[in-house]
Image (cartoon, rainbow, N blue to C red):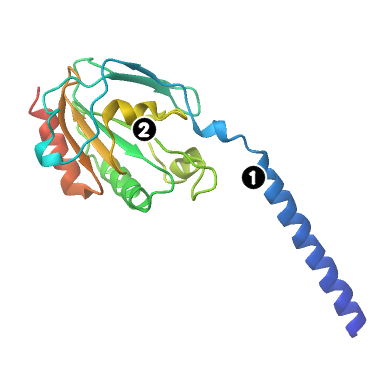
Amino acid sequence: MNKTILWIIGGVVGLGLIVALAFSIASEESLDESIAFGEITVEGANLPFLEDPSTDPTLGASAPTVSGGDWNDNQYSIAADGRPKIVIFLAHWCPHCQVEVPVVQDWINSGGLPSDVDMYSITVLSEKLRPNWPSQVWLEDEGWTVPVIMDDAQSSAVLAYGMRGTPFYVVLDGENTNLGRFSGEVGVAGLEAMVQLAQASN
């Protein structure tokens, strides 16, 4: 094959890559940032931001009812429904969340979450230009089975529960009483401890 043909082939391949990249960029730019946000309803007073989990002044206080939906318009409500709950807040760009999500899902798959405790997740602080956006693609790729509420662009769910850092956990009893709020990776041991805390409230 002579050099002229090689140059032609190289030029065609290069042009093809440029066109493909342009289409990819155009596709990403065409995605509406609002697809990563939901509509949130908050009933009740917000909990103040958590400063120190060991001295949380809101222990025993009523948490607000937070309602919203996921990207498939499945609707959920974290309310005083008689069932204890663990709520996990996740940010798609957070490296600690990226580590924690498969740990939580493996724990659930292995039967770690008992039938008498519910678990909800809330996607928060969505930013289009940061990794793993939008959250729904990331969580679906991880096989995430926990019901999801998408926070709104005003971070209403973050404000409602006084989230500080991600991942962030809130343990609630059946009356939506705050039993504990925790920030950071907790792993399996932490998940099991939160289950025990939730069950003890029954």
Q: From the viewer's perspective, tell me whether residue 184 is left or right of residue 11.
A: left
Residue tagged 2: 122
Is 113 rendered above or below residue 84? Answer: below
Could you say where residue 55 lies in the image, as x and y percent from the top left? 10, 38
Q: Which of marks 2 and 1 is nearer the N terminus?
A: 1
Q: How many marks?
A: 2
Residue tagged 1: 28
Could you say where residue 45 lies in the image, as x and y percent from the top left? 26, 18
Could you say where residue 131 lies in the image, as x and y percent from the top left? 49, 50
- The amino acid on which the numbered mark 2 sits, given as a three-letter code, is Ile
Could you say where residue 77 lies in the image, as x and y percent from the top left? 33, 19
| Circle on res. 152 | none
Q: From the viewer's perspective, tell me whether residue 3 is left or right of residue 156.
A: right
- The amino acid on which the numbered mark 1 sits, given as a three-letter code, is Glu
Neighbours of disc 2 within 10 Å: few (<14), some (14-19), many (20+):
many
Neighbours of disc 1 within 10 Å: few (<14), some (14-19), many (20+):
few
Q: Residue at the location (20% across, 48% down)?
A: 188
Q: Residue at the location (71% across, 56% down)?
A: 21
Secondary element at image label 2:
strand
- Nearest the viewer among 161 and 19 is 161
- Nearest the viewer among 65 and 52 is 52
Is 156 rendered above or below residue 194? Answer: above
Secondary element at image label 1:
helix
